[in-house]
Image (cartoon, rainbow, N blue to C red):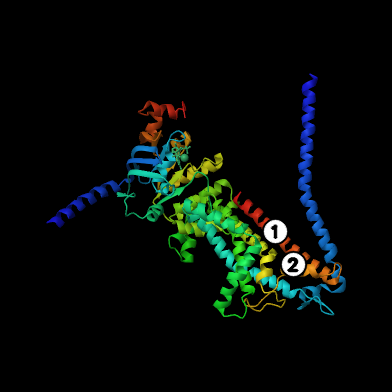
Amino acid sequence: MGKPIRCFMKRTRKENLIRRLFCLFSLFSIVFLLGIVIVLFKEGLPIFKVISFGKFFFGKFWYPVYEPPDFGILPLLLGSLWVTAGALIIAVPLGVASAVYISEVAHPKIKGFIKPAIELLAGVPSVVYGFFGMVVVAPLVQEFFGLPVGLNALTAAILLGVMAIPTITSISEDAISSVPKSFKEASYALGANRWETTVKVTVPSAAGGISTAIILGMGRAIGETMTVLMVAGGAAVIPRSFFQPVRTMTATIAAEMGETVVGSEHFHALFAIALVLFALTLSLNIGADVLTQKFRKRLR
Amino acid sequence: MVIEIQNSKFKIKNEKEEKIEKDIRISIRDLNIWYANTRAVKDVSLDIEKNKVTAIIGPSGCGKSTLIRAVNRMNDIIPGVKVKGEILLDGENIYDEDVDVVTIRRMVGMVFQRSNPFPKSIFENVAYGLKINGFLRKKEIAERIEQSLKDAALWDEVKDRLGDSALDLSGGQQQRLCIARALAVEPEVVLFDEPCSALDPVATARIEELIQELKEKYTIVIVTHNMQQAARISDFCAFLMLGELIEFDKTDKIFTTPSKKVTEDYITGRFG
Ligand SMILES: Nc1ncnc2c1ncn2[C@@H]1O[C@H](COP(=O)(O)OP(=O)(O)OP(=O)(O)O)[C@@H](O)[C@H]1O
Ligand SMILES: [Mg+2]
């Protein structure tokens, strides 16, 4: 009788060990996240001893190495928003249209080709996008619009748009193809054709998922660093048109962090920018989550 | 000469059709339906009378849904379905090549097993079919919506909250909303595929009562699993098994003196 019991105990102990190990693994990323947040606050907040919130967010000049320095991030904030907005103007129609095409229109064979192709776009390293942007897109934009420089907000928006398409397409496609078949049947039974059914029933029923997709695509665009560093032109001035060179928050941090003295005001200012970025992406993620929940409830 | 002959032929045909039209609205002729290679409906012929309730009963998987969905060509949207035979709606074969599916579906409405209102407002749900079919005047749409919600016995419960989401309604209300949605485009025939199978007894009674009222205006075909329901609400009853029509007669006759042994076995619950 003793033997099986011992065996049983051994197993539970082993299982416990495994469970703890996995718990540890998952805690690891949370600890990491916590670490990031703590460092961001610790290194970012001190800048506000030197400069007020208002001057930081609404200051029109970013001259961090002048004497005295200016730490106004408005040009960078607007640069980011400008480029992101441009990217969305490109990525939303293309991404959603591709999703509709893939899930509702395309022949299975074509679908089997297009879907992986679009997903492959997501796997291209951003430095490659940047390179492609500098060598191909920027000259084209420059020539087409007759501009003095090709590295500007438009070029960055085009590239970020293309980079956001896979996110938007694959999440929208999930949402569209999980619309219950019964909705479509009801629509057909009332005499609607495929087009009317898609536009008036299927896509609106997937609206929650599509908005989530757009928000996540936006997050992708706002957070992107390498590509914009390479193609946006890098001028820290308040953008007035898409044809101007701009500089985003991410590009600023990437470009300047290596050259600044640790613990200096400039250093703290860069961390404060990172904090702003973090807050922005966090709220986008929360927004996406809320929408997904709402969407789920609506479809039961 | 030739023209005359053709003309007279045409005339004779027309007279025939007029005779049919008097009481028979739908005439199913030697209907066969395949899913890929499995034949789900086999040589079914039956006539459905105007302003009557015709029930289709039979064990699960015998082809009831396939048969009823053939009447408004809903099977068309399933890939790989093949249909042979004819379904005459007021004398015209709905499977003719030059027939517009939209017209058929507008004339033959359908209510499904599980209520499937769109995730839109109550108003928008009923308005959908109208808008699809080209009704654009606000006043006309509002009037039609009120009328069809009244016909579906739902008006009093929802008239003060037409803007609310249809998904906030109870199951029975949702099913009645689906009925209202089907009625809004003023069909002549309404198909019900097990409309009560997801409803409680009270909601079921409500729908049954409603179907009785609807037959004044519409021709009704209903698939049901529930023998008592078929007996209660139908005038005619078709018994289907393994895709074949075993017996078709007045409901009274089917439930009192069926002519086939299998029918009797089925309705007395000896199998199925
Ligand atoms: N989409 C489909 N593809 C392939 N076969 C199908 C499809 N739908 C139904 N069938 C088959 O056709 C036959 C008839 O199905 P049908 O749904 O018409 O039966 P039913 O009488 O309505 O059954 P139930 O009472 O369970 O609803 C079944 O054998 C079923 O497996
Ligand atoms: Mg069925």
Residue holding disc 1 = A285
Q: Does residue A196 appear to the left or right of A83 in the view shown?
A: left
Relative to A191, say whether B24 is above or below: above
| Residue A117 position in % (x across, y down) | 55, 56
Q: Residue furthest top?
A: A1
What amino acid does circle 2 point to? Ala
Residue A191, labelled with which disc? none
Residue sitting nearer the eye, B79 or A235: A235
Residue holding disc 2 = A254
Residue shown at 45%/48% (left/top)?
Answer: B110
What is the CA distance from the residue labelled 2 to the residue labelled 1? Answer: 23 Å
Residue shown at 70%/76% (left/top)?
Answer: A235
**Quarter where residue B185 is shown:** bottom left
What amino acid does circle 1 point to? Asn
| Residue B146 position in % (x across, y down) | 50, 58
Residue sitting nearer the eye, B131 or B164: B131
Q: Residue furthest left?
A: B1
| Residue A69 position in % (x across, y down) | 83, 77
Rendered-image quadrant of the N terminus of chain B: bottom left
**Quarter where residue B212 is shown:** top left
Ligand 1: does it lie within 8 Å of the C-beta at label 2?
no
Chain under disc 2: A
State how many labels appear.
2
| Residue A250 position in % (x across, y down) | 72, 67
Residue B123 visible in rendering: no
The mark nearer the N terminus, 2 or 1, is 2
Residue sitting nearer the eye, A114 or A276: A114
Relative to B126, say whether A246 is above or below: below
**Quarter where residue A244 is shown:** bottom right
Chain under disc 1: A
